[in-house]
Amino acid sequence: MDIPNYLKPQLDNFDQRIQQTQEMLADPDMAQMAQEEINNLEKQKQNLLDSLKSKDEDDEQDSENPLATKGAILEIRGAAGGEEAKIWANDLFRMYLRFVEEKNWKYEQNEFGLKIKNKNAYTALQYESGVHRVQRIPETEKNGRVHTSTATVAILPIVPPTQIEVRQDDIHMDYFRSGGAGGQNVNKVNTGVRLTHKPTGIVVECTLKRTQFENREIAEELLRGRIWQMEEEKRLAQISEKRAAAVGHGMRSEKIRTYNYPQNRVTDHRINKSWYDLNNIVDGKLDKIIEALDEELK
């Protein structure tokens, strides 16, 4: 298998640390600990090589089917509304998580939301991008007033390299030490990855995984998704104004939906349709909304 140039320093680091630790085997007092450390380092190195092999197999399948959809990336951020907006963002995250779990879709929970590994995920969720507004009485409200808060939702497709070509010369890469949990390797090796796409100025980063390779792969997926999103918004600007306003792929400034708790109502403003079933909807029962949007906006 071909080893990418950016991955070679990390593999060399593993080899160097294994060699240094092997010198400790001659010391009877240190031999057992040294062998355990060698086993751990060799396991980490093998995991890295296995992930590279898996990536090669995925790329081969994508080349055979250039229209393949690999899934979707869900991002949620609190917007207007202070602390209540953060709470609302968490509630939205739970709503989508319950939806994904009921569909039995594979997923990874990560620093930016969810990475959903199902070919139907993006098609189902593509119209969820935008501003979601909530109207309710926060738990911290003492006078019973209804507050309005918002959170932004972005749905990005996991775009295979065969669909969005990103020239390596157009990417500036930075590596840094990841913080938080992850074991000794996270603290000793620059595993965090930040990519800057020079033509567009898009910056993405990932510190989720234990190796540079895995973090770079996730960062490249994010980058391809954001480039795709940018190109899609340009395309929408060239078609009818009515449909462009309705679809709103990733247009985060657009208020697309309101969740009104006092009235038990969810309203999607793009199709001017309401459902009086708020509790079930925020518990992940989104099928009726998704079906209505697909019928009206496709």
Image (spheres, grey):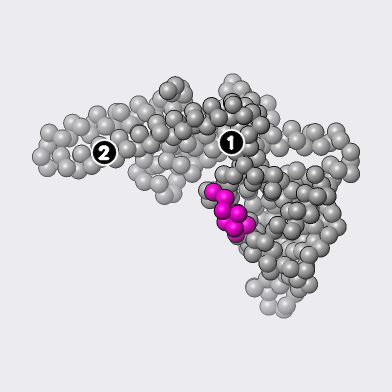
Work out whether mark 2 precedes mark 1 in sequence or the reverse, and give the earlier one.
2
**Residue that appears at 82% across and 47% down:** 297
The quarter in which the N terminus is drawn is top left
Q: Is residue 183 left or right of residue 233?
A: left
For mark 1, does the 10 Å Cα neighbourhood hold few (<14), some (14 to 19), or many (20 or more) residues? many
What percent of the width, then of the height, locates residue 201? Answer: 66, 32
Of all residues, the one furthest to the front in this rendering is 64
**SS at mark 2 in the image:** helix
* C-alpha distance separating marks 2 and 1: 31 Å
Q: Which residue is mark 2?
A: 39
Say above or below: 81 vs 64: below
Q: Which residue is mark 1?
A: 221
What is the three-letter code of the residue carrying label 2?
Asn
Say above or below: 229 vs 280: above
Q: Which residues are magenta?
A: 98-106
> Which quarter of the figure has residue 84?
bottom right
Please give the count of numbered marks on the rendered protein. Answer: 2
What percent of the width, then of the height, locates residue 64? Answer: 59, 26
> Which quarter of the figure has residue 20?
top left
Q: Is residue 180 left or right of residue 39?
A: right
Of all residues, the one furthest to the left in this rendering is 28
